[in-house]
Amino acid sequence: MGVHTYFKTLSDLEHLYRLPGKFKFQTHNVAAHSFKVSKIAQFLGTVEEMNGETVNWRSLYEKALNHDYAELFTGDIKTPVKYATAELKELFSQVEEKMARRFIEAEFPKEFHEPYFRRLKEGKDETLEGRILAVADKIDLLYEAYGEILKRNPDPLFFEIYEEALNTILKFQDLHCVKYFVEFIMPDMLAEKFMPHSELRDLTERIISRSDSPPN
């Protein structure tokens, strides 16, 4: 009981695997994902700061480190399912937030409730830090799919995940860090030589081209 229980659950995150039920050459767990998203968010926040934006680093780190903790209660839900509709995504967020709140009320002393309600709620909001988190989360997902494509995983789902992740990242093109990612990081990714290289490059170029086109 108590905070001791919370500390124990941190190890459980290592056994919560992303994209369960699908063959992967490299498995990823939620603990590692949270760490990677925090490191990516740190870089993206640095790009924003170097371009004159004010970053609330405490908020950014809290959001990034905790953004998937509630998956302990729901498990990892495949991206194409979780984001099938805005309504479904909002429903999942509400369920995760409600279950996290119940956990905090049951296990944390009352004086810690408020800070942990803040830390374990949905972090992707309209603040700069929430938007950086949304991009960092999708960049890590993009790289997970990219790694499977690189290893020639035959499941077309990984191309779908790659496309969905990149489309979401490009929705934040007003951010300096997204411009930097598209201009300087993605070309290095696509310059690597591997079997499905031309297919992935063509897909990426089509997605970026669509995002640059004015709406009808």
Image (spheres, rainbow, N blue to C red):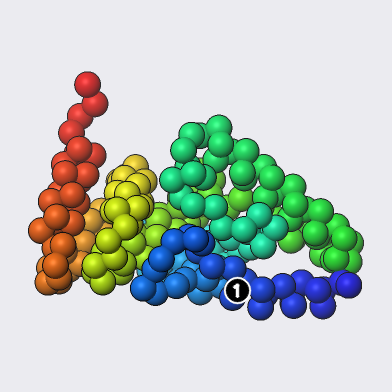
Q: Which residue is mark 1?
A: 15
Q: Is residue 51 visible?
A: no
Q: Residue at x 84, y 66 (%)?
A: 108
Residue 199 visible to the viewer: yes
Q: Indicate the position of residue 103 as horizontal and vertical percent values.
A: 80, 59
Q: Say which element carries label 1.
A: helix
Residue nearer the viewer, 182 or 190: 190
- Screen quadrant of the N terminus: bottom right
Nearer to me, 73 or 140? 73
Which residue is painted at 62% across and 58% down in the image? 75
- Amino acid at the residue labelled 1: His
Q: Is residue 58 left or right of residue 174?
A: right
Q: How far across and down, in percent of the image, does residue 199 sit?
A: 14, 55
The furthest residue to the top? 216
Nearer the observer, 71 or 160:
160
Q: Residue at x 50, y 34 (%)?
A: 86
